[in-house]
């Protein structure tokens, strides 16, 4: 997404803009002012929710 957006905005405006402040994604949130512990806890919660959704949609024969 980052490179695609940069190329699109460079083609559109002549100056490339970035979608995220820094890659990987957790560094973007840290640069936005979030403490590292908050970022880690939010990613853990997101991982748990995604795993629960995947288990809920699993078809058991």
Image (spheres, helix red, strand yellow):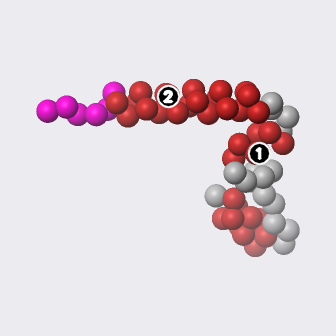
Residue 6 spot, x, y in % from top left = 74, 64
Residue placed most toward the observer, 25 or 8: 25
Q: Residue 28, relative to residue 9: is it above or below?
A: above
Q: Distance between the residues labelled 1 and 2?
A: 21 Å
Q: Residue 48: which numbered mark, if any?
A: 2
Density class for disc 2 (Cα within 10 Å; few <14, some 14-19, many ≥20) is few
State the residue at coordinates (49%, 28%): 49
The image quarter in which residue 4 lies: bottom right
- Give the SS element for disc 2: helix
Residue 58, image x and y in percent?
Answer: 28, 34
Q: Does the magenta stretch include residue 20?
A: no
Q: Is mark 1 on a helix, strand or loop?
A: helix
Residue 39 drawn at (x, y percent): 71, 32
Figure quadrant of the N terminus:
bottom right
Residue at screen point 85% across, 68% down: 15
In the image, the segment drawn in magenta is 56-61
The residue at which mark 1 appears reads as 28
Residue 55's disc is none
Say whether residue 22 is visible: yes
The overriding secondary structure of the stretch rendered in magenta is loop
Q: Is residue 57 magenta?
A: yes
């Amino acid at each position: 997404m980052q490179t695609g957006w940069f190329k699109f905005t460079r083609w559109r405006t002549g100056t490339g803009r970035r979608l995220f402040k820094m890659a990987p994604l957790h560094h973007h949130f840290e640069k936005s002012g979030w403490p590292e512990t908050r970022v880690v806890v939010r990613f853990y919660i997101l991982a748990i929710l995604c795993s629960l959704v995947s288990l809920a949609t699993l078809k058991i024969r």
